[in-house]
Amino acid sequence: MHELDSQFEGRKRDHIAFALKRENEAFGRSGIDQIRLDHEALPDLNFSNVSLRSRSLGEVTATPFLVSSMTAGHSSSLEMNRTMAVVCAKRGWWMGVGSQRRELHDFTAREEWREIRKTAPSAVLLGNLGIAQVIETDAEVIKALIENLEAKAMIIHLNALQECLQPEGTPQFAGGLTKIAQLVKQLPVPVIIKETGCGISASTARRLVETGVSAIDVGGFGGTHWGRIEGARAPAESVQREAASTFADWGIPTVESVRQVSSACSELIANRTGMVSEIWASGGIRSGLDAAKMLALGATKVGFAKPILEVAIQGEAALDHRMEVIEYELKTALFCTGSRDVDSLRGKAK
């Protein structure tokens, strides 16, 4: 195995192991518990008529749910991603794939997605590449990643803190906004911007919306914290390990980030016609009720990561059951707020 590939394999295995540890999660810090949905004691509808159908990127979808990008391109990821893709296709969830970075230098890594496509041809998959790699990669190469995956959209993830603290990090972000604006025009699919656990502020959202991106996934503080993970991975007594403890609580809580991005988008829409970006919520989402609160705040799609990872490793049956429970929880929240569908829930957060 090439030395670079070996390093990548080890890092990705570390990421999965550390992501499952409670100490690397900013549990209870997302702000979701502070959001209230008023109970409607007499909903004027039947539970059987409540619909989870929603609309995103111009399409009607069976649910507003997304399995957030997690892992790809290493020996243990194929079966896990196959499981997630099969169940997502069955239940109508979208799936963000793990970073396609390895595919930039190792074309054999693309076989993982070809294998998964054979098993789950109808799965809605979203491509994924970090901003540091996007900046230095030609648009034609990114188009090839999209084509190989048959991706619905391309996620560009932002992970400034992680790159600073990762022993193998690449914190070279200069020119990122300009590159995003170029790709919006050059790529054949919508461009999604996603943070990875530290949230997106109103000022950042304004700059992103101006580029024409189709959606902003806030990836807020409150779930898996990559600063903590990279700190745990860093060598003892290294500067990264020591700095990681300082930044263990760094980030904008998910609820605050959704509100900031929503406010920024509303301002731009009011002042300039045509500037419309969807808001996607992720970061500490643990149930269908959490998702209902995010949708009530204005999110179009809601992403789950760790809750899916925990059961995906147990197989398709366990994952299918967990996703069914999440759907039932959202449907119950809709019914108990007198909301016939997701759109009817908008604006009901307190």
Image (cartoon, grey):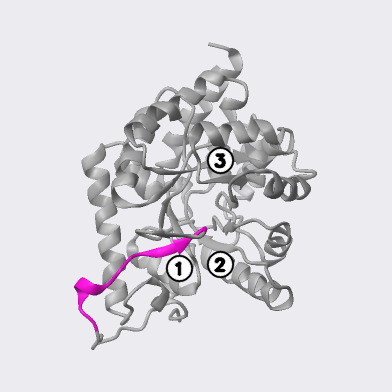
Q: Which residue is mark 3?
A: 128
Q: Amino acid at mark 3?
A: Asn
Tell me where residue 108 appears, x and y as whole percent. 51, 18
* Residue under the point 40% across and 60% down: 64
Instruction: State the residue in front, 217 or 339.
Output: 339
In this rendering, the answer to whether 13 lies above or below 34 is above
The answer to which of marks 2 and 1 sits earlier in the sequence is: 2
Disc 3 vs disc 1: which is toward the camera?
Answer: 3
Residues drawn in magenta: 45-57
* Residue under the point 41% across and 29% down: 77
- Estimate how packed mark 1 is, as few (under 14), some (14 to 19) or many (20 or more) residues with alpha carbons within 10 Å: many
Q: Which residue is mark 1?
A: 294
In this rendering, the answer to whether 291 lies above or below 15 is below
- Estimate how packed mark 2 is, as few (under 14), some (14 to 19) or many (20 or more) residues with alpha carbons within 10 Å: many
Query: CA separation, marks 3 and 1?
Result: 23 Å
Q: Amino acid at mark 1?
A: Met
Tell me where residue 346 appears, x and y as whole percent. 45, 77
* Residue under the point 57% across and 38% down: 230
Q: Is residue 129 left or right of residue 149?
A: right
Q: Which mark is residue 258?
A: 2
- Image quadrant where residue 279 sits: bottom right
| Residue 324 in magenta stretch | no
Q: Are marks 2 and 1 in contact (CB under 8 Å)?
A: yes
